[in-house]
Amino acid sequence: MKVEPKIVAAITAAVAYYMQAQAAHAAAHAPAERAPEPPKPIAPFSAWAFSGRQSIMEMRRLWQLRLAR
């Protein structure tokens, strides 16, 4: 099969033009950079809440032990 240099040059130019157009389109429609989100507030440690959760877990464990017999 004979390769025509003019056809190869035309195909190469078309592909280069297409890639250049795609790069320009991507650059024009790139999302704007967002500002970094502020850090989320961390709930302070509460001994009362910790004690409440611990007692709830203990009560559930006791119920499981009684029901497992």
Image (tube, rainbow, N blue to C red):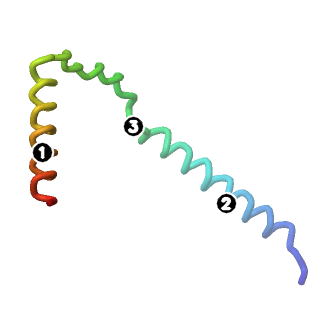
Crowding at label 2, few (<14), some or many (≥20) Cα neighbours within 10 Å? Answer: few
Total labels drawn: 3
| Residue found at x 71% / y 57% | 13
Where residue 44 is drawn, which disc sits there?
none
Where residue 14 is drawn, which disc sits there?
2
Residue picked out by circle 3: 31
Quarter assignment of residue 62: top left
With respect to residue 61, does 36 lie above or below? above
Crowding at label 1, few (<14), some or many (≥20) Cα neighbours within 10 Å? Answer: few
> Along the line of sight, which residue is nearer the eye, 51 or 9?
51
Instruction: Give the quadrant of the C terminus.
Output: bottom left
Q: Earlier in the sequence, mark 1 or mark 2?
A: 2
Crowding at label 3, few (<14), some or many (≥20) Cα neighbours within 10 Å? Answer: few
In percent of width and height, residue 68 lies at 15, 59
In percent of width and height, residue 30 lies at 43, 39
| Residue found at x 9% / y 49% | 63
Residue picked out by circle 1: 62
Q: CA separation, marks 2 and 3?
A: 28 Å
With respect to residue 43, does 25 lie above or below? below
In percent of width and height, residue 25 lies at 48, 46
| Residue found at x 62% / y 52% | 19
Q: CA separation, marks 1 and 2?
A: 76 Å
Q: Earlier in the sequence, mark 1 or mark 3?
A: 3
Q: CA separation, marks 1 and 3?
A: 55 Å
Secondary element at image label 3: loop
What's under tag 1, amino acid-wise? Answer: Leu
Tell me whether circle 1 and circle 2 mark residues in contact (CB < 8 Å): no
Position of residue 8 in the picture relative to residue 18 (left or right): right
With respect to residue 12, does 20 lie above or below? above
Instruction: Give the quadrant of the N terminus.
Output: bottom right
What's under tag 3, amino acid-wise? Answer: Pro
